[in-house]
Image: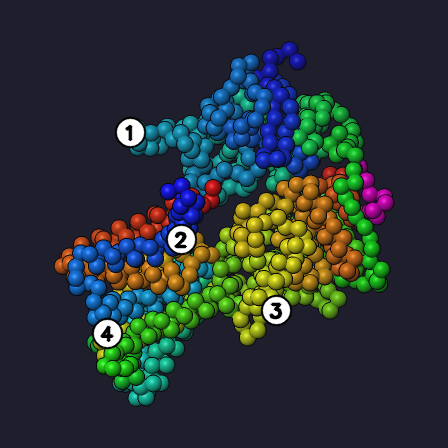
Amino acid sequence: MNLAPVLRLEGVSKSFGPVNVLRQVTLDVHPGEVLVLLGENGAGKSTLIKMIAGIHHPDAGRILLNGEPADLSSVHMAESAGIATIHQELNIVGSLSVAENVLLGRLPNRCGVLDRKRMRRAACEAVARIGLDVDVDTPADSLGVAQQQLVEIARALTLDARILILDEPTAALTGSEIDDLFTIMDELRRRGTAMIFISHHLEEVARIGDRVAVLRDGDLIDIVPASTPEDELVRLMVGRAIEDHYPRRREYEGAPDLLLEVNGLCRGARVRGVSLEVRAGEVVGVAGLVGAGRTELLRCIAGADRYDAGTVTLRDGPVGKGNVGQAVMRGIGLVPEDRKNQGLVLGASVVENVGYATLRSTSRAGLVDRKGQRARASEVTKRLSVRMRDIDQPVRDLSGGNQQKCVFGRWALAGSRVLLLDEPTRGVDVGARVEIYEFINEITRAGGGVLMVSSDLPEVLGMSDRVLVMNNGRIVGELAAEEATQDSVMSLAVRDLDVSTL
Amino acid sequence: MTTATPAGRRLAAQTGRFVSANGALVGLVVLCLALFIATPHFFTAENLVNVGVQASTIAVLAFGQTFVIVAAGIDLSVGSVAALASMAAAWMYADAGLPGLLALLAGLLTGLVVGLVSGFATSYGKLPAFIATLAMLSVARGLTLVISDGRPISTPDAISFLGSDIPIAGGVTLPVPILVLIVAGLVCSFVLNRTVIGRSMYAVGGNIESARLAGLPVKRVLVTVFALSGLYAGLAGLVLAGRLSSAQPQAASGYELDAIAAVVIGGASLSGGVGKASGTLVGALILAVIRNGLNILNVSSFWQQVVIGLVIAAAVGIDVLRRKDTRH
């Protein structure tokens, strides 16, 4: 590389509370190159790009632009320094026109009065530069996701971005839309724009990337050429040794009764004909990439969403569609992926949160069994060693791990036989993790069954008795605990299945 | 001095916590003290009973509103519903010839049914509560005018009783509106604290998605809060009609805003999940005391509106600051 780096990170570290998200990352990005950031969920990719984009600030180390230390203390500072970011969630105001979106925040005006002519001309130029063929006066929400993304890129270009960060831009695109995006990226590369590209799809790495920086658990593992074979990339990405952080024990000695049977479940493009079963005493792991349809599958089974076709059957017969109340009463418990917005009522106390599922079943004549609910909540929080002041403390004040234990505690009180876990230990520290795993052991020892979705591969491998791999809405493989390895699971999860038919 | 300090400090800390947890109550007490100092006419038994009677209509409306606000909704229709319920009851008696007591029950039923309609529109019909009840505000007022042809209808004794005084002992009387206020408040508190549906209201208001995924019947809860609000509005309307011995077509117009103000002054959050019957009572009393005090002090009713607006802004502003403070 004979060009000087446009962006350089030097020994950058970042931690959130006690969690080290990034450790001592040193990285160069050169003009006219596409640097791919590769890593599992939680490896630190988003934190890294958020620091470059001015959203987070490094605890240690520094960021240099063209060899000069840069002040990236806000998104605005980063933008004026020529750094533009296309986030996974698009920042488009749907009701405004394409032109207004392209120039949002910098609308040409005369004494506060919008200069429509100048706005339209500037927007047309920007849109033409990336070959996007839309009328700049149409409202942005009449465009598809792919075109909206291009509007954002056009906007980045009007900022004269020298560094463009693209966070999983292909996740929502179809095959031909991805081709179009890559054509535009090639063009930008020719003009000397430096790009940082995040994707989970390994085959895209070789197609668009020049170099690949692999992150794992906050460490920069290696920087390799994009031509590196996929197998090697997978090894770099997930190749950590599994320590005994996963104390899975199968201690159930009863009959392996069928607890949950799912047949031909379909919901839109995300769940496409899934069949599976969970038996008493087992933990079934569901691995796959983000967006493979795992969360949607769990939500359908739990009754949180309706589904188009298929059946969900428990031991005592089928469960109705989209009826959480019935599913809960019949012994299904969902631990959702987003505990703050879906799992807990943050302003309510521990005793309330733990007791929601048993509020009705333990009531008499519509009156809450207050004494009983308190006693049971005290007992279960003690059993799960939830660390709190008392059971009247709002769950908002608890740490992530202790909050998650409250969600588990709710299903423990409800006596749920089938637990559906979605990313059960996301944002949970190591100690609380092991306590949650022990609770999973306890559930299965008592004859319950667990269906566990996780993007944390070691967790899936460490805690599951069987591993299902989901890819593009389908279950593409089932591996017994003994034969499942990170490589075998990942190769099934990232294999490209007819993406173009989506 | 030095020996008294730890105890004194503890007392100060306890007082501080009490004041911060019961800001509205402290405000009410301060307000009463100020009026007590300002005028000898405020702190007389007669005037205090008067305040209670004046507070009763708004307080009953506000208790009903508390259910809705705890569940993160809002009911703008309660004033109109109060008028419609009282008018329906008076009409049932005067024109349809129903016995007085049955007419009273028909009035309550009217409030309940109207509330159910709003509840179904918001939960199953997915209309925003603000819009559904804004529509109901207009519909209920219109129906009131249609039934009455714009004229007052006198009420039967059963309803007039709700506005009368009952003798207790030794010539002392208790106004029925105050009795109604107490019972309505106790029922509200009981439902919110002790019943499954009441606790579910807090969960739904706190986070509707978490409540749904925990298996709570979210839609049924939403229907119930509006039904209760309608029922309470009907009761408030009957009390108001009872005090006047007639159902007025323009009765309780604009009262919904006072009811919402009372709930919010009482510490409830419009974003849901927080609120207590006792707080609502204090909020309603604050409004009544301000009106009463300003009347005694001969402040014009035009200025009263300005003062009440400022009190609402101050009460909620202080509450917001206090909450920010406790969240580190």
- Residue tagged 4: B248
| Residue A7, horizontal then vertical, whole percent | 58, 19
Residue at 18% over, 56% down: B38
| Residue A410, horizontal then vertical, whole percent | 63, 58
What residue type is disc 1 on? Cys
Q: Are marks 4 and 2 on the same chain?
A: yes
Disc 4 to disc 1, C-alpha distance = 54 Å
- Residue tagged 3: A361
Q: Earlier in the sequence, mark 4 or mark 2?
A: 2
Give the mark toward the camera: 4 or 2.
2
- Residue tagged 1: A111
The subunit letter for the residue under badge 1 reads A
What residue type is disc 2 on? Phe
* Residues marked 4 and 2 touching at CB (< 8 Å): no
Magenta part of the protein: which range? Answer: A479-488
What residue type is disc 3 on? Ser
**Vertical relation: A492 (above or below) B216:** above
- Residue tagged 2: B18
* Residues marked 2 and 3 touching at CB (< 8 Å): no
Residue at 68% over, 55% down: A383
Label 4: few (<14), some (14–19) or many (≥20) C-alpha neighbours in 10 Å: many
